[in-house]
Image (tube, rainbow, N blue to C red):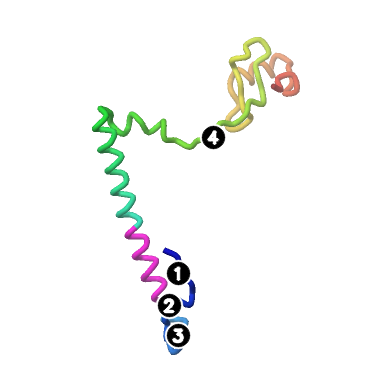
Amino acid sequence: MQHRHEDFDIPQDVTVTELEEIRSRLDDQISARREQEMSLAAQRLKDAAKDMGYHISELMHLLSERTEHPVKYRHPQNPDLTWCGKGRRPLWMNKVLEEGHTLADLAA
């Protein structure tokens, strides 16, 4: 439901302080309502999972929106060993660099 500013009949004698108080109370109500709706959604998801013979925890990894990072580096002899360049450098990379290879050598 869309509302335009003109849709609200706010008397001209209402002060900015009073409007801010109203907004604060509205924000509190919105937060409480959002929590209620999220709890209901979570319960519906749990119920749906249970109806299908699963526990919701078994399905959580499928719901993750984690993004995959592109491969930036690849082991020179074992192409299955890769690193995207984020986080800790893998042990295989440290070993290959100690052997004299450069990051340019490992670039995918």
Residue 43 placement, left or right of 96? left
Sequence-earlier tag: 3 or 1: 1
Front residue of 16/9: it is: 9
In the rendered structure, which segment of residues is drawn in magenta?
A: 21-33
Q: Residue at x 39, y 66 (%)?
A: 27
Sequence-earlier tag: 2 or 1: 1
The reply to whether callout 3 and callout 2 are in contact (CB within 8 Å) is: no
Q: Residue at x 30, y 49 (%)?
A: 39
Local secondary structure at mark 1:
loop
| Alpha carbon separation for disc pair 4 and 1 | 36 Å
Q: Type of residue at label 2? A: Phe
Local secondary structure at mark 2:
loop
| Alpha carbon separation for disc pair 3 and 4 | 47 Å
Which residue is labeled 2 in the image?
8
Which residue is labeled 4 in the image?
67
The reply to whether callout 3 and callout 1 are in contact (CB within 8 Å) is: no
Q: Quadrant of the C terminus?
A: top right
